[in-house]
């Protein structure tokens, strides 16, 4: 009850389905599969009053009851309520932005999502696929917007709002993706708002430094960060490519220095060409990469999927210069056909594939990936949020793995998706059913497939990863080669 003696209810629908879905429609937070909804609970935001209401529209299944027991501000109560509801859960979806209650619920969901999987924080991890532009903290977007007087979409309707009126929760639904988008391209639009805050060159120093600090905090000890020079320098900011690269490098160096030195976390930078920007942009990016090849560990192509063969010449130049190649391909459900990944491997000389999950529909392409030992950099939450898969449970990671294709977990865009690598590990372990040994093997395979120089990877192995394989096979020695051999042997044993 508030000061005027009124109850303000947030309506929560609770069901007993095995795999809950959390969806906010107006002021109702649905917990459970919509089609099996059984009960509504109305939680007052200002007191412990709870109403219960049987839902007659849908089937009956045994309900699970949670309730907030603490009094407090509306925000605290919803946070507590949703915190109870989301404990150990894996999927969250908020689709309505029109009420204050939904805003609080969304904040709690985002908080919950960012804290899921903290039990894996102490496990040394490798991440090969993380975009710098997708790693920007929400607080940094807000801070930079305010500092440089940049308008952003805000509030329920997403109206462009002057910097002085922006709030973290007001921009969250438009800067972070907490719910699936219709396709990859729609999600990519979100990047434009983040990009608009790259107002001066110092921002690149800041976001690179924060990205490395955040990765280290997650337990990552070998990180490949990638960014697209053409995207970073797009109008209206139009920074010089060299200035952006220098700022990013300094930011990475500063973070490593703060953490105790370059071996506190190994970091390699990948240069991305955006195929959908056209051949001129691809050529310019390739020229830039080749001029600064010593500062990058590899080359990638990303953005909305195109026919990868259109950019054959660029990749040939990178290959001729001895560059390492990965390529986003077969990611999008509609246009990411399996041939894209196949062509990237056969004609663009890709040693790894970004995503590649749509090859699941073509056994012959799967065989090629297996036989050539091409690693797929898989990002489960990202694939779900860009509608590449219908649900987390439907993700093909397990089938790819048991087919004999090396894969590894990644975040893709932790800032934009409100996740971290520990969150992804939680999904892989508890929703997709990968064992602890599977995760260890994938970590060691990712270290083996990383584009960081061999001596850097070996040093990181000896510092952080050597005990992982040793724990599984006490007879083995501690060398990098022995760890990778164990990982491959374990993978072989999983093939069905
Ligand atoms: Zn990506």
Image (cartoon, rainbow, N blue to C red):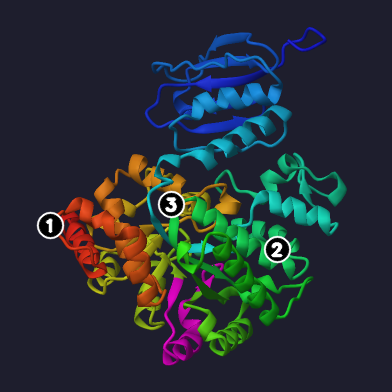
**Sequence-first disc among 1 and 3:** 3
Residue sitting at the far front: 260
Q: Quadrant of residue 356?
A: bottom left
The answer to which of 433 and 266 lies nearer the viewer is 266
- Within 10 Å of disc 2 (Cα), the crowding (few <14, some 14-19, many 20+) is many
Q: Is residue 482 visible?
A: yes
Res 380 label: 3
Q: Which residue is drawn at 43% across and 16% down?
A: 63
Indicate yes or no: mark 1 CB to ligand 1 under 8 Å.
no
**Sequence-first disc among 2 and 3:** 2
Q: Can residue 182 be seen in this view?
A: no
Q: How many marks?
A: 3
Location of residue 296 in the rendering, given as x and y in whole percent from the top left corner? 51, 79
Q: Give the labeled residue for mark 1.
A: 475
Nearest to viewer (mark 1 / mark 3): 1
Element at label 3: helix
> Is 143 contained in the magenta span?
no
Location of residue 90 in the rendering, given as x and y in whole percent from the top left corner? 44, 37
Residue sitting at the far left: 475
């Amino acid at each position: 009850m508030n000061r005027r003696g009124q109850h303000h209810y947030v309506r929560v629908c609770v069901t007993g389905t095995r795999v809950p879905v959390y969806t906010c429609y107006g002021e109702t937070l649905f917990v459970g599969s919509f089609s099996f909804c059984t009960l509504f609970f109305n939680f007052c935001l200002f007191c412990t009053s709870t109403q219960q209401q049987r839902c007659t529209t849908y089937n009956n299944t045994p309900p699970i009851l949670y309730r907030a027991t603490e009094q407090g501000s509306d925000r605290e109560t919803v946070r507590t309520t949703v915190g109870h509801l989301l404990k150990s859960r894996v999927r969250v979806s908020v689709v309505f932005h029109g009420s204050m209650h939904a805003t609080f619920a969304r904040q709690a969901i985002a908080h919950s999502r960012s804290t899921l999987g903290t039990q894996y924080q102490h496990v040394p991890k490798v991440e090969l696929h993380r975009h710098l532009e997708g790693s920007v903290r929400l607080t940094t977007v807000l801070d930079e917007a305010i500092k440089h007087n940049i308008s952003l979409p805000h509030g329920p309707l997403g109206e462009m709002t002057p910097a002085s009126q922006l709030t973290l929760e007001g921009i969250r639904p438009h800067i972070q993706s907490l719910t699936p988008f219709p396709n990859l391209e729609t999600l990519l639009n979100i990047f434009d708002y983040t990009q608009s805050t790259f107002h001066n060159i110092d921002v690149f120093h800041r976001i690179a430094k924060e990205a490395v600090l955040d990765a280290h905090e997650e337990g990552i000890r070998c990180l490949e960060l990638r960014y697209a020079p053409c995207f970073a320098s797009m109008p209206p900011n139009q920074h010089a490519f060299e200035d952006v690269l220098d700022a990013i490098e300094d930011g990475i160096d500063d973070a490593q220095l703060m953490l105790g030195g370059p071996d506190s976390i190994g970091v390699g930078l990948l240069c991305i060409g955006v195929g959908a920007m056209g051949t001129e942009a691809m050529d310019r990016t390739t020229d830039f990469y080749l001029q600064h090849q010593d500062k990058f560990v590899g080359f990638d192509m990303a953005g909305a999927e195109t026919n990868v063969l259109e950019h054959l010449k660029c990749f040939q130049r990178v290959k001729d210069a001895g560059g390492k190649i990965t390529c986003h391909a077969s990611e999008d459900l509609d246009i990411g056909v399996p041939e894209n990944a196949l062509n990237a491997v056969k004609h663009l000389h890709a040693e790894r594939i970004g995503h590649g999950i749509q090859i699941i529909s073509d056994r012959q392409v799967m065989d090629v990936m297996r036989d050539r030992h091409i690693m797929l950099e898989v990002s489960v939450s990202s694939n779900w949020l860009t509608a590449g898969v219908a649900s987390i449970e439907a993700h093909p990671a397990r089938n790819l793995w048991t087919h004999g294709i090396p894969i590894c977990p990644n975040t893709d865009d932790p800032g934009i998706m409100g996740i971290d690598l520990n969150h992804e590990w939680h999904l892989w372990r508890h929703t997709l059913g990968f064992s602890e040994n599977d995760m260890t093997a994938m970590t060691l395979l990712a270290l083996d497939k990383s584009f960081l120089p061999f001596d850097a990877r070996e040093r990181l192995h000896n510092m952080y990863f050597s005990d992982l394989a040793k724990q599984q096979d006490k007879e083995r020695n501690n060398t990098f080669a022995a760890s990778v051999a164990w990982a491959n042997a374990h993978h072989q044993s999983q093939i069905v």
